[in-house]
Amino acid sequence: MKKLMKAVLKTKAQKGAEILNLEIPELKFGEVLVKVKTTSICGTDVHIWEWDNWAQNRIKNLPQILGHELAGEVVKIGDGVKNLKLGDYISAETHIPCKNCIQCLTGQEHICGNLKILGVDCNGAFAEFIALPEIVCWRNSPELPYEVASVQEPLGNAIYATLVEDVAGKKVAVIGEGPTGLFAVGVAKVSGATEIYILGKHPYRMEIARKMGADHLVFVNQIDPIAYILEKTKNVGVDIVLEMAGSQEAINLGFKIIRKGGRFSAFGIPSEKVTLDYSGGIIFKGITVYGINGREMYKTWFKTKNFLSSKRLDITPVITHKLSLEDFAKGFELMTTRPKICGKVVLIP
């Protein structure tokens, strides 16, 4: 095996990243070495690329390899690995749990008290190789395409956010037409939601939302979305809001279009602190709010596997661009261009 690999690193506390040759990582106890076949750009990666306030407060270890979504092949087994073998085709759960805290010991590993996240707290997947703890490796079906396998992590976000409670027979509003929001539209559709609203601004992505099953394309920059939804729901509001954008405007909107007694899944990550009408928006409306962080380990992964293997959920309309790892800057340019001109961008080492 060669000794060096190409990797995309955040080297400086400023916008951007660079590609460098690094030594292939040595394995620690319980780790495997994975040859990365595909890796994809996430909104979190964009935060780090842009070096916004969230990234400046969250990222502590520069230089650091970016990225956390991947699919690859196990090419080396470290000491202490019990179940994986050479040649296994895997994706990664990006939340690395400690296995010892109260959350881990009570079935909440995804919000571990000592949680580490790939590409955020440690080196990530924008590289030819990555060392992964066996406990976060998920075996894939051999038939699963690499580009689909690499986006199971954000698809899992969408599945968790959408199905934290039942959606069958209910009216759902998805705020934000980013890739995870687009996945959520598809998940809601195949899970029995009877009316799906997608709220966004960008025609390219709104058309993808239509392909994923949205019944109403609500352009918030063209019409009054509150008036539109209240009219369509006879002044009641939607049963479920999936807030996937993370802006102050989107959060306010979500609490205004949800019906009394509705369910609000909070997934979008604001770059700044937000204010909230706590009494009017939540208490007096009797809203149930779920903070969606990651995926339930491994309940969500089994759901993801079943959705994909059944062929009932087709996520390929969301995957719009495939680039070489060397073209990572073009990928970030696509992700940050306004109006939006891409869905999910996959990088191939």
Image (cartoon, rainbow, N blue to C red):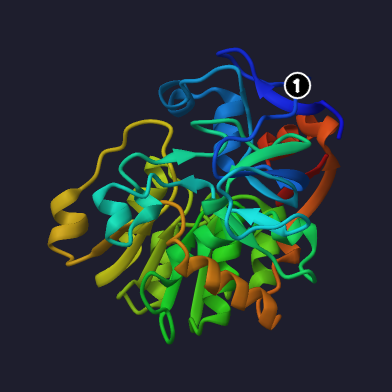
Q: Nearer the viewer, residue 285 or 162?
A: 162
SS assignment at label 1: strand
- Up the image or down, 96 lies above or below 273; here it is below
Give the side of residue 308 with respect to residue 28, left or right: right
Residue type at mark 1 is: Leu
Measured as percent of width and height from the top left, residue 112 is found at 34, 47
What is the x, y in percent for residue 289? Answer: 27, 60
Q: Residue at x 44, y 24 (%)?
A: 53
Indicate whether 170 appears above or below 30: below
Residue where numbered disc 1 is placed: 22
Which of the 4 image quadrants contains residue 148? bottom right
Task: Answer left or right for 113 relative to 40.
Answer: left
Decide: is 232 above or below 278. Answer: below
Q: Image check: 54 left or right of 23?
A: left
* Residue at image coords 42%, 52%: 267
Closer-to-camera residue (54/216): 54
Q: Quadrant of the N terminus?
A: top right
Q: What x and y, as percent, mark residue 197?
A: 51, 69
Residue 316 location (% of width, % of height): 75, 65
Q: Nearer the viewer, residue 257 or 243?
A: 243
Mark 1: few, some, or many residues within 10 Å (few <14, many ≥20)? some
* Count of picture labels: 1
Identify the residue at the far front of this view: 79
Residue 115 is at least partly visible in this image: yes
Q: Is residue 44 above or below residue 14?
A: below
- Tell me: 119 left or right of 38: left
Residue 123 falls in image quadrant: top right
Decide if residue 342 is in sight here: no
Tell me the quarter of the image containing the C terminus: top right
